[in-house]
Amino acid sequence: MSVPSGLPTKRAPGLRARMHVLLTVIGLLSVIIQLRFRVRAGSPTVIAALNLLLIGLHGLFLMKAILWRGRRSDLMPGFLLFIERTSAIGVLAFFGYSLLLLANANFSSSLTYREKAEITAFSRGEIAFWGSVPYASADLRFPERNGRVDRVLLWADERDRLWGGAPVVVQFREGFFKVPWIMNINLDAERQSQEVLHVTPGAAHALYLLTHLYLSRMRWEEARATAVAYVSQYPEDNDVARHIGEMLDAADRFPDVVAVLEWVKQPDYDVSVLLGRALAKVNRAADGITVLERATRLQPDEPDAYRELGLIRLAAGDVPRAVRLFEKVLQLQPRSPDVRAQLRRLQQIR
């Protein structure tokens, strides 16, 4: 049965169909790579939209190649062929640019660096691409670069936790070809907390975040000042005071432990042990003994206060009391190799 010559006929996918499949795949790879390695220059929103447009175009060409047999009598065949070839060149150009970004990142041995910025504009939208693809972009102003503004596409998690006007820290890495790219964008907790405290000096959460940030970055003087500000305003918060004291104690910052924990109004057992130990370390043994003895009355079945009291007595040369206190520790906590070793040494001396 013959088919009328005026109608298109179906055919099996051929070389052209495979070409469009390949162009669609590498177009998608280009978008993924460019989103993964975001450069600080250019117009990423326009580039991504154009990428997706070219991918969608080759998807349509693929459908045409699979479903219809091309005929020289098709409407404007030369024009369609021009669009097909031009879009293919565009996809290959974007793919080459993406490979450059990939090599720039993977061959780089540079360290990361951070720059402070502010989000001066925040936009959300959707790109039509066989449905809708949501995206968000932000204009970042860098005060340390003479107010330079860069537009950056945001990842999904960044879209959820950033907003217009937010202070941020942008983490960069210098590439192999000296093309820096953005690794991540995070809220600047320090500046955000300082802005909150400027408006509300007694904001507990902002004070706590700022203290923890300074402690984690070993900025001890600032940590001490903000910790004292917190505990002096909230002297009954043993949990936060204990957490701060433990971090300072681990860093052997005993004067800071004393400065912070002496503000606690009614210290619990753990806070008392930390404070008593720190007082002994700063040559205030008598005060340390008073605090630690109060701790033994709070929780008489806990060994830590007895251990610290034993060490203070031993340092003062009061061996008999030290031995009794260490024996009390072993009674409450038999598995204490440090105390057992101390007792054996003292018995040999005696």
Image (cartoon, rainbow, N blue to C red):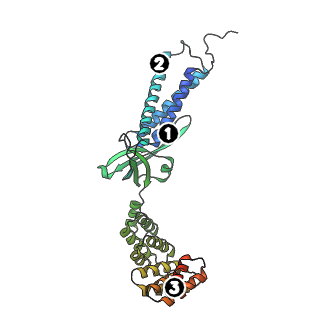
Distance from label 3 to label 1 (Cα)? 71 Å
At x 54%, y 88%, the residue is 324
Looking at the picture, how far across and down is residue 237, in whole percent?
49, 75
**Residue 76 appears anywhere in the view:** no
Gap in angstroms between the C-alphas marked 1 and 2:
30 Å
Q: Is residue 291 left or right of residue 64?
A: left
Q: Quadrant of residue 194?
A: bottom left
Residue located beneath label 3 in the image: 348
Q: Name the residue at the left extreme.
A: 146
Figure check: 253 above or below 8: below
Q: Residues within 10 Å of mark 1 (few under 14, many from 20)?
A: few
What residue do we see at 31% from left, 52% from top?
144
| Percent position of residue 19, x then y | 53, 24
Front disc: 1 or 2 = 1
Residue 18 can be seen in this image: yes
- Return the x and y of residue 42 as percentages of the image width and height: 37, 39
Residue depicted at x 47% and y 18%: 79
Q: Is residue 320 left or right of residue 10?
A: left
Identify the residue at horizontal 38%, vertical 41% (top origin).
176
Q: In the rendered image, which residue does mark 1 sit on?
A: 32
How dense is the environment of label 2, judged by Cα within 10 Å: few (below 14), some, or many (20 and up)? few
N-term-proximal mark, 1 vs 2? 1
Left/right placement of residue 248 relative to residue 16 reads left
Dot in front, 3 or 1: 3
Indicate which disc, 3 or 1, sits on the residue closer to the N terminus.
1
Q: Element type at marker 3? A: helix
Q: In what quadrant of the picture does the N terminus appear?
A: top right
**Residue at numbered disc 2:** 79
